[in-house]
Image: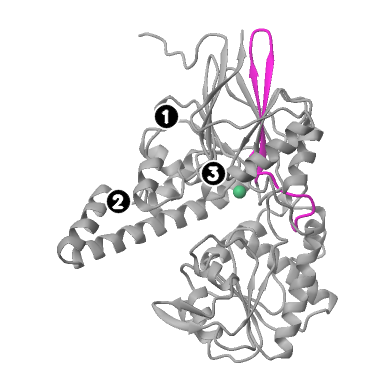
Amino acid sequence: MKKHRPGHHGLVKLQFLGGVGTVTGSSHLLTTPKSKILIDAGLFYGRREKFFEVNTTFAYQPQRISALVLSHAHIDHCGNIPTLLKHGLRSKIYTTSATRDLCKLMLADSGRVQTEDFRYLKKISSSQKGRHRARRGAQYMNIRGPLYTEWEAVRSISHFRPLHYGQKFKITNDVTLTFYDAGHILGASVVLLEVRMQHKLLRLGYAVDLGRKQLPLLNDPTVLTGLDYLILESTYGGRMHSPISDAKGKLREAINRTVARKGKIIIPSFALERTQEVIYFISELLKEGSIPPIPIYVDSPLATRVTEVFRNNIHYMDHEVKDLVRRDESPFDFLNLHYVQSQEESKALNNDKRPMIILAGSGMCEAGRVLHHLKNNITESRNTVLIVGYMARDTLGKKIVDKEKIVRIYGLEYELNAEVVVINALSGHADKNDLIEYVRESSPVNEVFLVHGDEDQTRCLYDALSSEGLNPYIPAKNEEAVLYKE
Ligand SMILES: [Zn+2]
């Protein structure tokens, strides 16, 4: 049998497959003389047909991949792993144990959401008549089903092989992998890949996504040095965040103002990381006595399960959290904090007129239990909607941020009279200055490949790095860069 050789003898190449010129669908392919390493396999978000087409079209044969390296558990980095397994991927998937545990929940949720969307499509395509139905039907016929089900998502976890931060591990004959803390979300990594060539050890760094210093719960991002190349995100390549300390102050003021009005505080919150950060800040405010001891409800089954993973992975967190847990003061369990389980319990909160804080999903208010809390509370001026995360265009969350007078929930119109408070300081991504500083500290680097950003943001970072002589380069989608030739 002819021996398969992944790459050309003496050549190391990097292909930028996804999360290029955009922020979703991160994936890159490193080809060495002896291996093909896929870095991340994220879901691309787009309209239904594009979503299906992009996420099932691969520039490589999945069965030829020697190893998959996964940076973190956000769906735009891990969400296409079950699809790849269905299309023949046989390799191991290397990541941290916290990322594996989070992926189990996040991928299952993604499978469930896709299945529900597919059922909905099927229903409308069979209930509508005439031309409209034909058009919808055609759209439905083009989509053969969800990319994967909840069950297929859960099954994919058996391919994961966890590694510790700092553990150098030979993943193929010529490539060694080491994960370091990215300070982005729990278990997230910046990645170091070292390719052993005859005359050189080639070092490639991957910081996508890169966190920030001083984020609650997390350690600061690790700087990779001695690199030949760095792949870097540029989500906020042209923008600056407010300091994280602002978030706590704004949170305190919003809670106190609302309690003085005897109102409720509704916080639409992403299940992963943002919910736990807000709980942490609230626990601090309570301890300091700077907010009254009102009840706090986490009303999201996914957020509750994700918090359980946080509880089991304290060793991934910063020393403040470790100290708290050692003193038996876990920031995830304290008096007044309740994790809501059933739908009935969730609905019962509507009849409870006491001031309270409700954290509920979905993060952008497009689905989930947050909808009935909004419906029941936004018409009254004594209540507050507290926005702590990014809201994409056209979502209900964005309409609330824009303080539109009338918003639609479950097809009905509601007047938005509640106070709207927006806290922008909690982003988990490095901003422009953080990114520049990171490259400065990593340098010298032959080339810094800028990915994972909208064009204007990436361009802005490019200009800043180039003016300092820091060698940025913006690859095009599917472009192949030769990293080394022997
Ligand atoms: Zn991320």
Q: Are marks 3 and 2 in contact (CB under 8 Å)?
A: no
Residues drawn in magenta: 188-217
Residue 155 percent coordinates (x, y): 42, 46
Q: Amino acid at mark 3?
A: Thr
Residue 126 shown left or right of residue 447 in the figure: left
Residue at mark 1 to residue at mark 2: CA–CA distance: 22 Å
- Residue 449's label in the rendered image is none
Can you say which quadrant of the picture contains the N terminus?
top left
Residue at mark 3 to residue at mark 2: CA–CA distance: 25 Å
Q: Residue at x 61, y 22 (%)?
A: 175
Residue at mark 3 to residue at mark 1: CA–CA distance: 18 Å
Q: Are marks 1 and 2 in contact (CB under 8 Å)?
A: no
- Residue 59's label in the rendered image is 1
Position above or below: 483 against 221: above
Quadrant housing residue 481: top right
Q: Amino acid at mark 2?
A: Gly
Residue 128 lies in the magenta stretch: no
Q: Sequence order check: which comes first, mark 1 or mark 2?
A: 1
Q: Amino acid at mark 1?
A: Ala
Position above or below: 283 against 165: below
Q: Sequence order check: which comes first, mark 3 or mark 1?
A: 3
Read off the residue under disc 3. Answer: 22
